[in-house]
Amino acid sequence: MGLVGQGARAAVGLKTMTASATTAPGQQTEFNAAYLLISLMIGFIAGVLAGLALGLGNLAKIDPNDIKTLLGIAAAGYAGTDFIENSLSIFIPPAKAPAASDSASNALSASVGVLNNHVATLAGVVSSFQAKVTPQLDTTTTTTTAASVAPELTAAFKSCAHLVNTDIWVPALNDAFSKYNLQTNRRMAAAIGQFLIEVGPGFQEVVENLNYSQARIFEIFPNEFPTLASAASYAHNPEALGNRAYANKNGNGNEASGDGYLFRGRGLIQLTGRNDYAKFGAAIGQTAEQAAQYCQTPAGAAVSGCWYLAVNGCLPLADDWQISKITRIVNGAAMLENNQRIAYSNAFLKALGN
């Protein structure tokens, strides 16, 4: 698509060149096939860069029928070619320098001006891509939409996970589901199947419990505590354990920074580490620290869980009922209790009427 965008630009340039030759017969015009080929390849590269700006996961899912995205990438090829060419011209001087120093200065100023214009254009294209592919918090959702799912969701919890307090969690989940487009039966069921394992059958562990015995610490964190004796001073000491176990991971500082405990797991998907909270916070207009506190509330726990599933490509997997693949994204290669996650998801899907 980048090459197509540059091809359109080349066609306009050829037409302009022909018109110039007609209106100014004394001016010689020349078609350079080699330069055209190079320009097309630069447009191709600009399109690739625009695709990478989308992120590899989103790039792999581009729908050929999604004209807006395809035209956006073509626009990047159109505008990005001048950006790349002018960038290179700063470092690679032309073969023949202008005769007068004033002419060289004017040419450089003109090139810088063109470069600045195209930088702004390309930045706008990339920004539009990011706005398109990043799920945003929908603040216009009406309570009517949320309420329409409430009776079915409440009944499903009563049938499949009766320990969950539906008075608290159904309103929170309704809101979160509508904000991140998880309102189909399959998406709701797949999400709840993960939530029930991540935070317990009663949603009782929204904040990670680090109050472990010495033996349990040694079992859960073998890399941080290679011997049973090394875990002794951290037994039943959650803050110290969090700071040690999560130090220098996922954007956290060292053990003394306190980041490990501050950014321990929270929410229905258990966001963990400064990086996770910073990304979630950016999506809802909060700092990492504010987002961590928000995730301790039912509303924040539900929103963060749905946000995580949406931005990590889990919704199409739910549509195809690929529960194990969702488990891998949520829990990593360990895929702990995957069979139970599948069982919960299947039960909720049946209870919701599919």
Image (tube, rainbow, N blue to C red):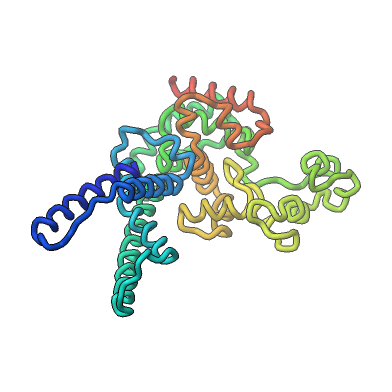
Give the percent coordinates (x, y) of residue 311: 48, 42
- Which is more toward the observer, 182 or 16? 16
140 left or right of 280 in image = left
Residue placed furthest toward the right:
229
Residue located at (49% from left, 45% from top) = 303
Give the percent coordinates (x, y) of residue 228: 89, 44
Give the percent coordinates (x, y) of residue 345: 54, 26
Give the percent coordinates (x, y) of residue 330: 59, 37
* Tally of marks: 0
Residue 252 lies, with reference to residue 11, above or below; the image says below
188 left or right of 198 in image = left
Residue located at (31% from left, 36% from top) = 66
Residue located at (55% from left, 55% from top) = 278
Q: Is residue 96 at least partly visible in the picture?
A: yes
| Quarter of the image with the N terminus in it | top left
Residue 89 lies, with reference to residue 322, above or below; the image says below
